[in-house]
Image: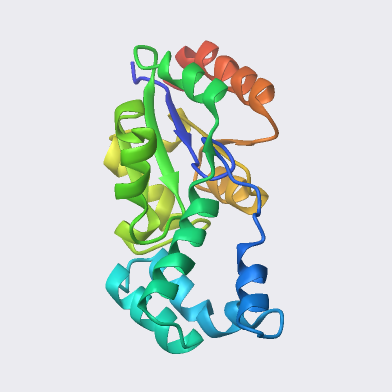
Amino acid sequence: MALPCVILDIGGVLEITPETGWVQRWEQRLELPLGTVRGRLQDVWQAGSVGSISEREVHARVAADLRLDAPQVEAFMADLWTEYLGTPNEEFIAYVRGLRQQCKLGILSNSFVGARERETALYHFDELVDQIVYSHEIGVSKPDPQAFEVTCATLGVRPEDCLFIDDVAVNIGASREAGMQGHLFDGNAQAIASIASHLDAAPSLSV
């Protein structure tokens, strides 16, 4: 009998990540029109999300595209990571920590180059789950079907045995198309209830 599996997103699920307004503050500081940072750095953010650019290259592009000196680049990136990392969803993390003997646990995250090192240092997600799959390490992002295929292969599980929890509706739709159950995260209580239901139904999932 196959073990049931629960796969989690990070931002908006394991991390609480409200917008901080840091981009707009930088545009005001640099006297740039609103939307300039996104426009100039959109390809950098995309490249960083699939690992086709290094952190050093990100810093170089930020410096060149926004005309920042080295201390400004460090401050800019610190603001980015502050919003990106948010704060831990302590209640949900504690619940997930108690599941280790009941199921396989994984993370599938649309990420940015440098995320693993920072999230490991701050939140120890590597100790929370069996495997973490980051988009910047596998070269594809959700909702690409390959992201779900790689995650199942990495965990050694079948899609039909998996419950995927994410806070983005299109990713939930993609997980269902990949053969998983999907739960759109809308608070801890509902997510916990969904996981409990999934685990209760595990024998029928594994027939």
Is 79 drawn above or below residue 150 in the view shown? below
Left or right of 174, for residue 102: left
| Residue plotted at (35% across, 61% down) | 113
| Residue plotted at (70% across, 34% down) | 186
Residue 29 in picture, x, y percent from top left? 63, 77
Is 133 drawn above or below residue 146 in the view shown? above
Instruction: Count all numbered tags in the image, as a single digit.
Output: 0
Is 110 drawn above or below residue 190 in the view shown? below
Left or right of 151, for residue 92: right
**Foreground pick, 2 / 150:** 150
| Residue plotted at (35% across, 29% down) | 129
The quarter of the picture where the N terminus appears is top left
Residue 69 in picture, x, y percent from top left? 40, 82
The quarter of the picture where the C terminus appears is top left
Is 139 drawn above or below residue 122 in the view shown? below
| Residue plotted at (39% across, 13% down) | 102
**Foreground pick, 51 / 157:** 51
Residue 135 in picture, x, y percent from top left? 39, 57
Residue 146 in picture, x, y percent from top left? 40, 57
> In the rendered image, is residue 152 in sight?
no
**Color encoding of the figure:** rainbow
**Foreground pick, 7 / 67:** 67
> In the rendered image, is residue 192 in sight?
yes
Left or right of 127, for residue 190: right
Q: Quadrant of residue 112?
A: bottom left
